[in-house]
Image (spheres, rainbow, N blue to C red):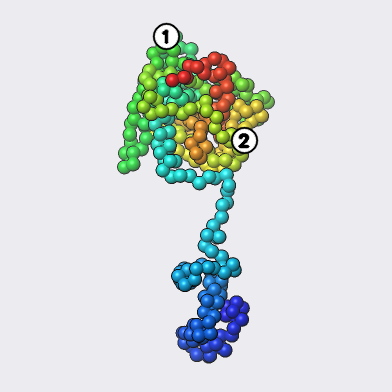
Amino acid sequence: MLSLRCNRNLEDVAGTGGLKAAVYELVDTADAEDWIDKLVLCALAENPGNPKLRALYDEAWLTMDEDIPSRSSLESLIDPELEFLDVDAWLTTAQEMTGRVCRVERTSGGALGTGFLISPSCVLTNYHVVETFIGLSGGSAPLSFRFDFRVAPDGGQQEGKTLPAAQTDWLVSAAPYSPSDTNPHPAALPGEDELDYAVVRLRDRRGDSTGWIDIGTPSPEPTPGMALAILQHPQARPLKLALDTKAIIGFNANGTRLTYRTNTQHGSSGSPCFTLGWKPVALHHSGDPAAPAFPPQRNAGIPLRAIQRHLERTGRAGALVP
């Protein structure tokens, strides 16, 4: 190090004594001849990760030689798509969103899927989640929606609060799924009216106290490689968050489906899908149709903008106005 970086020979400077004595002699000589700063710089250049050398340099000198890499220069922005998040704001919004997601259940018992508030009294879920009840006579459906079903900080389970569907006019709007959704190699795209969604009206206005997830406000368009978070009740379990930082695969050709890699399970149908900044972008609706014959490679959701357009086209968007 002394020869290569400082152009000095150790024996000429410190003699041929033991290592410890040579080091002391080297430091004394460098100090006396006024090149101690160069000695420290050379040592730090040779071993830039040594915290003691770094501390010595930082305490003794205010400027750093260009040949010495600062610790900050060793940090890198690996993925520009992943934004830095303000922790308090992110956690606050996450907590708000969890209060707007529910498990869809039969009133007699048994979980059916996931849903989420999109107005003070309306829940969005999948058509196939509530398909059994669509068309029932009597104007009501034996459906319930369990909110705040989660694991508490102490590990205990919170059973949450169950709200029934409205006794009359419970189905606000719906669009069936497409036969192509179950085909790994579909011959045709899903139609604009094949969006696998249902809007169900609750008996009570829970959203007055918790707020709701606004699907009408434009969100950033997902692009390949973007992160995607899903709040869900997989396998009917308490609320979970699945997050993949390189999730988005892309839209299909007519914008009626969005594919991604974020994990889901049976029971996750009807879950809200968010950007990393909690902007809602899709309604999760299915897994990979190639499974279980082949390992699953993707999940799929319905873009919320497609659902919003359907609501407007069918004259049902006004039913969501608070």
Spot the residue most to the right.
Answer: 187
Residue in front for this viewpoint, 275 or 252: 275
Question: Which badge, 1 or 2, comes first in the chain's sequence?
Answer: 1
The image quadrant of residue 11 is bottom right
What kind of residue is marked 2?
A: Gly
Q: CA distance from mark 1 to mark 2?
A: 42 Å
Residue in front for this viewpoint, 45 or 175: 45
Residue in front for this viewpoint, 168 or 51: 51
| Viewer-side label of 1, 2 | 2
Query: Looking at the rendered structure, which numbered label has been put on residue 36?
Result: none
Q: Kindly tell me whether residue 177 is visible in this rendering.
A: no
Crowding at dot 1, Cα within 10 Å, few <14 / some 14-19 / many 20+, comes out as few
Q: Position of residue 264 (x, y in %)?
A: 50, 35
Contact? badges 1 and 2 (CB < 8 Å): no
Determine whether, in the image, residue 96 is placed left or right of residue 33: left
Q: Position of residue 300 (x, y in %)?
A: 56, 32
Spot the residue most to the top.
Answer: 138
Determine whether, in the image, residue 155 is placed left or right of residue 55: left
39 is higher (above) or lower (below) than 151: below
The image quadrant of residue 116 is top left
What residue would you read off at disc 1? 138
Query: Looking at the rendered structure, which numbered label has been put on residue 250?
Result: 2
